Amino acid sequence: MKRSDWKAVLRFIGVLLIAEGALMALCIVPAWHFADGTLPQIALCSAITLAIGTFLRFRYRHFRDIKDKRMSYLLVVLLWIILSLFATLPFLATGTAQTLSHSPLRALSAAWFEAMSGLSTCGATVFPDVAALPSSILLWRSMMQWFGGFGIILLVLALTPKLGINKYSLYTAEASGADNTGGTFVRTVVTVRRTLTVYFSLTILFILALLTAGMQAWDAVNLTFSNISSGGFSINSDSIATLTPMQQYILTGAMFFSGINFTLLYLLFTFRWRKIGHKLDELRSYILLCLAAVTFVAITLHLRLELPWSDAIRLGTVQTISAFTTTGSVVADYTLWPVPVTFMLLIVAICGGMAGSTSGGLKTMRVIILFRNARAILRNRLHPHIVNPVRLNGKPISGHIANNVMVIFIVFGASLMLGVMGLMLCGVSPTEAIGASVGCLTGYGPGLGPSGGFGCYAHFSSPALWLCSFLMLMGRLECMTIIILLLPRFWKR
C-alpha cells in the first residue's frame, strides 16, 4: 500500500469529519433553546471535529486517487472507527458518560458503546434514564443514527462525485444493506443521490405525519430520525410505549418503509412500476414474512396474555415490525411476553429487511436464496440427473452468488456464537449473552433479560461493552469486511 493511498484515505476521512462536525454544530440549537448548560461543550466538540476534518481535507487535497483496491476495505473500517471516536466527544465533554461511572476507562467504554450504537443504527444504550439526558445529547443520539442510517459511504459517494476511488468497491465494502449478493453495480452517483432523496423525503413526510397526529416538534424530529434509520434511539426512557396508538402506527410505517429497498421505493414513488421486476421476489417475501410474524405474535398475545384484540394487534404489529427491520423501538416490555413470542422476535431480527434498506440482519434476499438453495440440493438428491437451478425473480442465479450467500451466513453464525461465548466469559448470563449478541450483531439493539425491553446495557462490564461495540461494527459491515482485514494475505504486497 503506497503512501499516496494513505494520504488519499486521510482526505476522505476529513470529508466525513466535516460532515460530522456540521451535524454536531446543529446540537447547539437545543442546547441554547432549552438552556441545558451544554452549549460551550458542544460548540467545542464541533469546533475540534470541524478543524481536524478541514485540516485533513485541505492538507491532502491533491491526493484524490486510490490505486490499491484493498484500501477501500480499510477506508470503510477506518471511517466507522474514527467517526465513532469523534462521536464520543459530546458524551465525554458534557459529562454524560461520567454519570455512569467516575472511572475514566469506564466512561470511555460507555461513550464508545453509545457512539458505535448510534452510527451503526443498533439502538442499544447504556443510559438507564434517557429522559434525563441533556437535550443536545438527545438530538446528537438521534442525528448519529440518521447520519449512519443510509450508510456513511453512500453519503460520501453522493456528495463527492469525483472521488478517485473505485466507487463500486467502496460501495460493496461497506455493504450496509446494499445488495452485494449479486452483480449489482453502482452505475452512477446519480443513483445514490436518488436513493438519498427518498431517504430525506421519507424523513420529512413522517415528521409532518407525527406533527399532524399531535406530537410536539421536538419529539417528532428525534423519533423520526431514529426510526426512519432503523435505529431505535428514543428521547423517552420507555421508548415509544407512552405514545398514542396513532403515533405508534405512524412510526411503525416509518420502520416498515425503512426496511424496503430504497431504489425500489424510488421506482414506486416515480410510478416506474415496470422496472421493479428484479425486486418482486424479495418484496413479496418481505411483506409475507411481516404479515406471518405479526399474525403469530398478535394471536399469541391474545390467547396467552388475554389481551383485547385491539391491543394484541397493535403491540404485535409495532414490536414485530420493529424487530424485523432491526429498529429496536420498544412498545412494551417484551421480555415479559411468552417465550415463543420472544423467540420469534429474535428470528425476524436475524432475518432483517430488504437489501438496500437501512435495516440490518442477514437481509430477506439472502434468506430466500438460502432456502431455495437448500430446496434445490434436496431435490438433486432425489433426482441427480435433473438440472434444478436456484431461481430469483424467475431467473436462475449463478452458483457464485449462492456460495457468497452461504459464506456470509456461515460467517454471521460463527460471529454470533463467538459473541455469545465472549460475553459469557465477561460474566454475562447465557440468556442475556444470546440476546445481546443477536441485538448487537443484527443492529436490533435490545436483547434479553435486563438488557431487553426497556432495559439497557449499563450493567455490562467494560470488556463486555467493547465486545458488543465490535459486534455492532461487524454487523454493520456484514462481517465480511472485518474478516478480510484479518487475513494475513490482505497485508502482503
Image: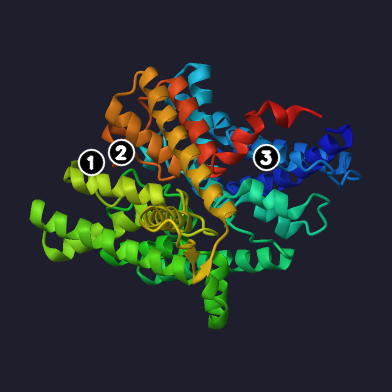
Q: Nearer the viewer, residue 360 or 10?
A: 360
Task: Return the residue nearer the eye: 337 or 46.
Answer: 337
Residue 215 at least partly seen: no
| Residue at (67, 50) in percent of width and height | 153
Q: Amino acid at mark 1?
A: Thr
Residue picked out by circle 3: 79
Residue 319 position within the rendered picture, expressed as x and y whole percent measured from the top left: 29, 54
Q: Which residue is mark 1?
A: 335
Q: In the drawing, does residue 262 fall left or right of residue 209?
A: right
**Measured Cα–Cα span from mark 2 to mark 3:** 29 Å
Quarter the C terminus occupies:
top right
The residue that appears at 48% across and 24% down in the rendered structure is 98
Residue 144, given in percent of the width and then of the height, sits at: 55, 46
Q: What's the amino acid at mark 3? A: Leu
Residue shown at 47%/49% (left/top)? Answer: 360
Where does the N terminus fall, quadrant-wise? top right
What amino acid is found at the position of numbered circle 2 in the picture? Gly
- Please say if 202 is above or below 380: below
Per the image, label 2 sits on a secondary structure element best described as loop
In the rendering, at what x and y percent does residue 255 appear? 41, 60
Which of the labelled discs sits on residue 54, or is there none? Answer: none
User: Sequence order check: which comes first, mark 2 or mark 3?
Assistant: 3
**In terms of sequence position, does the residue under pointer 2 or pointer 1 come before the other?**
1
Does the residue at mark 2 contact the one at mark 1 (Cβ under 8 Å)?
A: yes
Q: Please, is residue 55 above or below residue 260 in the view?
A: above
Q: Which residue is under mark 2?
A: 452
